[in-house]
Image (cartoon, rainbow, N blue to C red):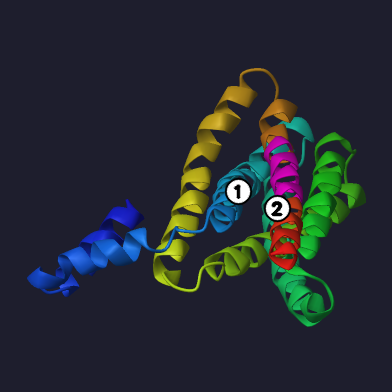
Amino acid sequence: MTLIFYLALKRRKNKPGSVNIGREEFSGIFINKNYNKIFAVSVLALLFYGIAEAVIYTWTPTFFRLDKNLSAQFAGYTLTIFWLAVTMGRILVSTILCRIKPYIMALCLSILSLISLVLMIFAGRGFIIILAIVLVGLGYSGIFPLIFSTSSLIYPKGKSILETFLFVATSLGAALAPYLTGIGLRLNAKYSASVAMIFMALVALLIIINIINYKIFVKNQNVC
């Protein structure tokens, strides 16, 4: 829907005689097959990330009450802890990003998130849960901005269109999350929370694929 609105506004701003030019600009963005492959994987990664993140901020307080028997007040605090950890994590990522390549950093954060999610879902109570939530927040903190910023600059033009695709993918993932957690809840509370773990594992896999794609692309350029 966001993409439709964007294209409609873009068309309205253009003069009637320049509509064909706008179409040519849109079609002229995706002309490099290697870039297209990398961008498509990035869009899919943000779709899966949107699911994994939405499960945390919409479902985990309820999961802690159902599965861990935590009080409603303490379960609510876990969400505050998560967002504080995300904020701190983004500050840390911004300070060390100049030393590590974005996709390598994103891979490390996705692995940290995955390990932390396993700890959060299957660990005990009290301090371990708080520690797991902090680590999940730190892991989640940089994945979206790293993939988003890298993917939106992959082409020499059309940044606004690329950003729209990436935002739509993430929002679509967030919209799918409640449905998927509902399916998991029919089996068990742990299954519902495990949706985040499953899709974070897929995010990590897609990041690895794009790291390989980048290496192949750079190698081909050097050969040429």
Residue at the image point whose x is 65% and y is 39% from the top: 62
**Residue 35 rendering spot, x and y as whole percentages:** 57, 58
Looking at the rendered image, the quarter that the C terminus falls into is: bottom right
Residue type at mark 1: give it.
Answer: Val
Residue at the image point whose x is 58% and y is 50% from the top: 37
Residue interval drawn in magenta:
198-210
* CB contact under 8 Å: marks 2 and 1: yes
Residue that carries the numbered disc 2 in the rendered image: 213
Q: Nearer the viewer, residue 178 or 34?
A: 34
Quarter assignment of residue 140:
bottom right
For residue 211: magenta? no
For the image, the number of numbered tags is: 2
Element under label 1? helix
Magenta segment's dominant SS is: helix
Q: Nearer the viewer, residue 166 or 176?
A: 166
Residue that carries the numbered disc 1 in the rendered image: 41
Q: Nearer the viewer, mark 2 or mark 1?
A: 2
For residue 205: magenta? yes
Quarter assignment of residue 183:
top right
Residue at the image point whose x is 75% and y is 41% from the top: 201
Q: Eyeballing the image, is 2 above or below 100? A: above
